[in-house]
Amino acid sequence: MAKKITVYIISILIPLAVGALSAWLTMDGMKAFGDMAQPPLSPPMWLFPIVWTILYVLMGIGSARIFIKRSENKEAADAALYIYALQLLMNFFWSIIFFNMREYLFAFIWLLMLLAAIIIMIRQFYAVDKTAALLQLPYAAWVSFAGYLTLAIWLMQ
């Protein structure tokens, strides 16, 4: 039981650390973004860190469930964890592309690739643990919404 708890704690801390580092590296860009004209349906700035924290926790719980079930199907679990790590890395770089580089079209294209990686991850998680996959659906929905915002911001520039 203590080993499972440790797996959950580490698994949750990894995406939270990635998100925190990304936020720290892009904080100046986020401030500038807050001053920009926003597209319709754009949520208030204070909501973003709350949503991302929840999503990172859900990612961590899902990845922990996959890691714990690794002994049952090592090949499928390893493939799922690989795409999980890949999409987390893509998630990290999106913030830099969008907030620091202000390359909104490239950020939109990057986000589409990230969404594809998330969908693949969900499918691979589903093959190992259905609950882990379902926990990622809010993430896919939020990234889809972020795609709308990113495209709208590019079009408004």
Image: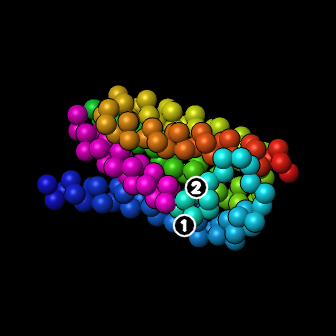
Q: Residues within 10 Å of mark 2 (few under 14, many from 20)?
A: some
Image quarter of the N terminus: bottom left
The question of residue 36 being in magenta is answered with no
Q: Residue at x 57, y 43 (%)?
A: 143
Of residues 38 and 88, which is closer to you in this image?
A: 38
Q: Residue at x 41, y 31 (%)?
A: 124
The question of residue 63 being in magenta is answered with yes
Give the labeled residue for mark 1: 21
Query: Residue 18: x percent and y percent?
Result: 50, 60
Q: Is residue 2 left or right of residue 80?
A: left
Q: Amino acid at mark 1?
A: Leu
State the separation of the CA atoms marked 1 and 2: 8 Å
User: Where is 131 relative to 21, above or below?
Assistant: above
- Specify the segment rendered in magenta: 50-72
Q: Amino acid at mark 2?
A: Phe
Q: Residue at x 35, y 45 (%)?
A: 62
